[in-house]
Amino acid sequence: MTESMKKTPLFDWHKAHGANIVEFGDYLMPVWYGGARTEHLAVVSQAGLFDTSHMATLRVFGKDAYDLLQWCFTRNLDACVGKDGAPLTDGKCVYGLFLDGHGHAIDDSIVYKIKDGEFMVEVNASMGGPVAKHLTEQAKGRDVTVIDLTDNLGKIDIQGPAAIKIMAKVLKDPEAVFDKLPYFSAKGHFDPASTLAGQAQLLDGTPILVSRSGYTGEVGFELFVERAQTVKLWEAIMAAGEPFGLTPCGLAARDSLRAGAVLPLSHQDIGHWPCIHNPWPFALPLTPSGDGFTKTFLGSAALDQAADAPYTLTFVGHDFRKVDTHVARVFLDGKEIGTVLTCVSDMAIGRHEGRIYSIASPDQPAGLVIKGLSCGFIKVGGKLAPGTAVELRDAKRAIQVQIETDVRPDRTARKALKSFM
Amino acid sequence: MYPSDLKYTKNHEFIRPMGDGTAEVGITSYAQEALGDVVFVDLPEVGATFEAGEEFGTVESVKTVSEIFMPSAGEILAVNETLEAHPEFVNEDAFGKGWMVKVKLAGALAGDLLDADAYAKLVSEESH
């Protein structure tokens, strides 16, 4: 470990609580505490707490902030909310990507509209600087400012069915916070000077931005707070969560949960190839017929020409055994057809008579023992139908897997908050 | 820190000579800590023979799949069958109920094995 590695405000807490610390990009982060399998299962059945302070947040503001984001961000801010494609309004957020001129992913992101002329852009660890630089270059004389808030903020994710009851114990007016807080919306602000700061506060008045979002597929929140308040927020939630089985979770569980939720990891499942032909078409501003875009944006011209782009497909195995993605190749009928981008074990799922069940599935057959399944993403030359069997081979083993449209069933992320109170 | 009646390898296996020409083999408590939750242990058949340093199986955790190497040449006499249903025994008690194979040693113990103090020194150098 070198002195140049960065630490979040919770580093000492992680070490004091037995975390196994690893290098993740520029940061020293917990990969697990008690065990990745325990933590993964805890999120699906109760709740888990994640230190995500290594992620980066940008402030994009000014008269032309909307114009800049409409040019650089893949979602159409006029038509991106809900089934009917409503505009992004105050307090709403949306998932999409920043592409380069080749249609390749620079990073994925959640963009929040705070108010007219004021947006918050959440990107991945160590990407605050690069994305801020990219947006500033693309601004080209527009009236817009980009400020990188990396190192100014702390972020904590609480995910799992017990998250609502736990947060209700630490928030000042939980009924008001949870009222009309649909999936991908936010209340409050981390800046005490913001007009929104009163919308969501801890019991002692500390303002927080509560975002109904996450990276696990399970219901919960991403919580943004001024950096100096991070440890206090974490400890308050851990104390409130104790009777509910709240478990601190590291990056290994975060990775296996997001894979089971069919979510990409930036620079692994999306990257230096056209961002098309993948499980995330909702990240692009497609017309209802799906054969064009509703706006022109940076990268759209390249994607229009990308009919030959490789296909990124979701797979699930038949047991939890994995392959080493650094060397693994994909084989169809004995012929090599591609590479493996992600391969992890979702320990909360199992197969039974042609269906995948989760430990949370209300209709799981009596006596079904769930041991986990390998899952992830492959990149191949041509499209394969769901149900297609392929073989993943690394230097040591070969595993049979199946192309799927979904992985972990019965995920809770979109469920009404009321059903958890 | 590490049991003094065992010998160790640089790859974090241990070997427990039983005094009668047989020995128990497994991975160390340090190895299981680094691997995380062990979910599967792939072990050889009884009767298989291995040279010192030869790979004899794999340990799969939620994070990774690691090869395990025979500390000293020998023939497999027994395999810990309980690990099939309880791979977590490796995490819970690596030197005890997490044992992996019993071998009939093919001669003297390999010369490059470490004693408990040398192994503790190796571990402290690796983790800094």
Image (cartoon, helix red, strand yellow):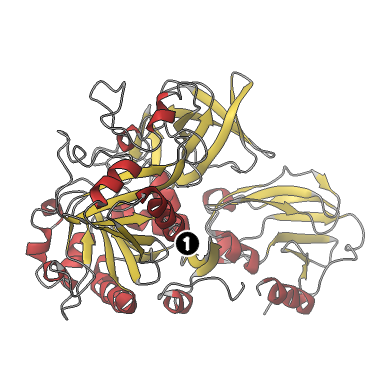
Depth check: A76 or A181 in front?
A76
Of all residues, the one furthest to the top in this rendering is A333
Residue at 26% over, 52% down: A65
Point 15% across, 70% down: residue: A197
Whether residue B120 is situated above or below residue A385 in the rendered picture: below
Asked if residue A365 lies left or right of residue B17, the reply is: left
Q: Secondary structure at mark 1?
A: loop
Report the side of A259 relative to A177 (left or right).
Answer: right
Quadrant of the rendered image containing residue B125: bottom right
Q: Name the residue at 69% across, 77% down.
A: B124
Count residues near mark 1 (Cα–Cα under 10 Å), then give few for <14, some for 14-19, many for 20+: many
List x then y, in percent, for residue B108: 92, 62
- The image shows a total of numbered marks equal to 1
Q: Is residue A191 left or right of residue B118?
A: left
Give the residue pinned by disc 1. A35
Q: Position of residue A88 (x, y in %)?
A: 18, 45
**Extreme-front residue of the structure:** A141
Q: Is residue A307 above or below residue A131?
A: above
Which quadrant of the figure contains the N terminus of chain A? bottom right
Give the quarter of the figure containing the C terminus of chain A: bottom left
Q: Is residue A16 above or below residue A419?
A: below
Work out whether residue A287 can be spotted: yes
Quadrant housing residue B102 = bottom right
Tell which subunit mark 1 falls on. Answer: A
The amino acid type of the residue labelled 1 equals Gly
Residue A327 at what x, y percent from top left? Answer: 65, 40
Q: Is residue A412 visible?
A: no
Q: Quadrant of residue A74?
A: top left
From the viewer's side, name the closer residue of B3 and A233. A233
Residue at 40% of width from left, 76% of height from top? A9
Residue A310 in the image: state x and y as whole percent: 50, 27
Taking depth in this image into account, of A294 and A22 the one nearest to the observer is A294
